[in-house]
Amino acid sequence: MLALKVSKLQPIRTGGVLRFIRAYSSELKPCSEFVKVTHPDLHDVTSDTNVAQELDQFKQTTLGTYNRPSLIFSHGKGLDLYAELPTSSNESKEYRHYLDFSAGIAVNSLGHSDPQIARIAGEQAERLVHSSNLYFNEWSGRMAHKLVEMTYEHGGLGIRKGAPMAPAASQLKAFVANSGTEANEGALKFARKASLVYANAPDRKTGLVCFKNAFHGRTMGSLSVTPNPKYQDPFQPLLGNVRVGELNNVSALPQLITEDTAGVILEPIQGEGGVIPAKLEFLQAVRERCDQVGALLIYDEIQCGLFRTGTMWCHSELPIDAHPDMVTMAKPLANGFPIGAVLMRSEVANAIVAGDHGTTFGGGPLVCRIAHHVLGRLSEEALLNNVAARSQQLMDRLGSITEMFADLVQSQGPRGKGLIIGLPMKKAHFASDLVAMARQRGVLILSAGSDTLRFVPSLIVSQAEVDKTMDVLESCLVVLREQNQE
């Protein structure tokens, strides 16, 4: 618990009251309750235990594309996750509890093992899981309609909040895929196809523009607009005619977005890149430049969309002149079931005809029924109020941490919006060190970019869970400070 020295008032944790008391405090003291390791990673597990055998199966048969700690999660509830402890075959299984403050990398917005979703999944699995996209199914169209309907209600894609639904000929349209990277692949293809249809020029427009620190996926098209040598270099050559700009650099846009540009893709808040928000004036300038040259603007809201920032889309409440032509989504849309989608303005949709794109599994009845349900839950007033309250609480605690650990945390402190928040550290390795230290004390957090801690908990996160995570983080910072003073 955060401790404050005060002359007349008792310490209190978070929220607006904390800021009031802080004016009367003479010193902030971090929580040191969790300095000792309580959840050690499993190393050298005895070979005759269940965990050792399962880990051995992974190593023998699963491609090693991830560096994972030796933990095997078996079940969860809400923000709680449980990992198996080593036991022999004749012993009952035992588990260790972790607080998941990562939401499976911003996926499980409604938490783990939600009972309503479990019930719906079971019901639909007994009815129909897959029928192919050669035919209509019961839930794909309903889910797409709900996406469109909610965008009119909440704003986005050039639509003002609360606007009446447009007639069918000028309606938003959705393409449903299986993942975020597939959604971005589709959006890039749609941008090039639309430019081919609408461009009034002798030469075909094929250029794509992205921005430093972006992450749009790992398939070849989305990887081509993810300008990180670590991800790109082993797979060169990628798509040609891709230019890379600097986020929030308005003056460079005329040379970056040119007459041959078909599409511009960006994240309104760069998640993997370090929780870096795009400035409003930059988004407006990009929109204006796209309109000048006839390029399509794509917002990748796979991590920052669907109410993580407190509004349906990260751009929902921005001025219309900062809205995109397409928005891509995935992570929370079905609360962990694989799905992605592109929502687009009618001008883009009208350029796409049968056969231009397709998917085997995208838009299946099982995942679309779940997504339809999740969309309704994510827009509930009580959940959005919780997002706002927990965001303020988290910002307050991280602001205090910035003050208490000025030797370890960058002075600008936390950045982000809603429940996608980053805290930049003074040395790059501090972020990865703290992720491991928090895990070894029972809390799962993330890093992002080269030096940033990333906080993207489930949107149902409680006040007590925010406090527990921040208390553990403060204790870890105490240990980190001691280690760097030795």
Image: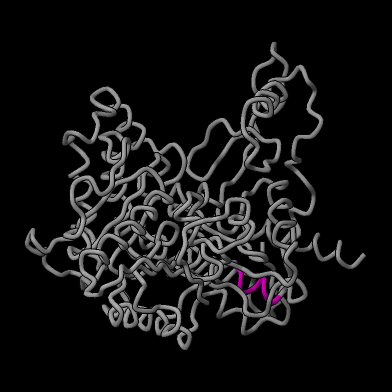
Q: Is residue 306 left or right of residue 49?
A: left
Q: In percent of the image, x 73 and y 41: which residue is there?
A: 39
- The picture quadrant where one finds residue 275 is bottom right
Queried whether the magenta region covers residue 60, the answer comes back as no
What span is in magenta?
398-403
Measured from the top left, where is residue 345 in percent x and y? 21, 64
Residue at horizontal 40%, vertical 46%? 179
Give percent across and percent down for residue 93: 64, 21
366 in relation to 452, above or below: above
Residue farthest to the top? 90
The quadrant of the picture occupied by the C terminus is bottom right
Q: Residue at x 57, y 54 (%)?
A: 236
291 horizontally vs 299: left or right: left
Which one is nearer the viewer's eye here, 15 or 315? 315
Asked whether the viewer can see residue 331, the reply is no
Visible in this render: residue 187?
A: yes
Image coordinates for residue 161, horizontal then vertical, percent: 22, 71
Q: Quadrant of the N terminus?
A: bottom right
152 on left or right of 391: left
Q: Is residue 399 magenta?
A: yes
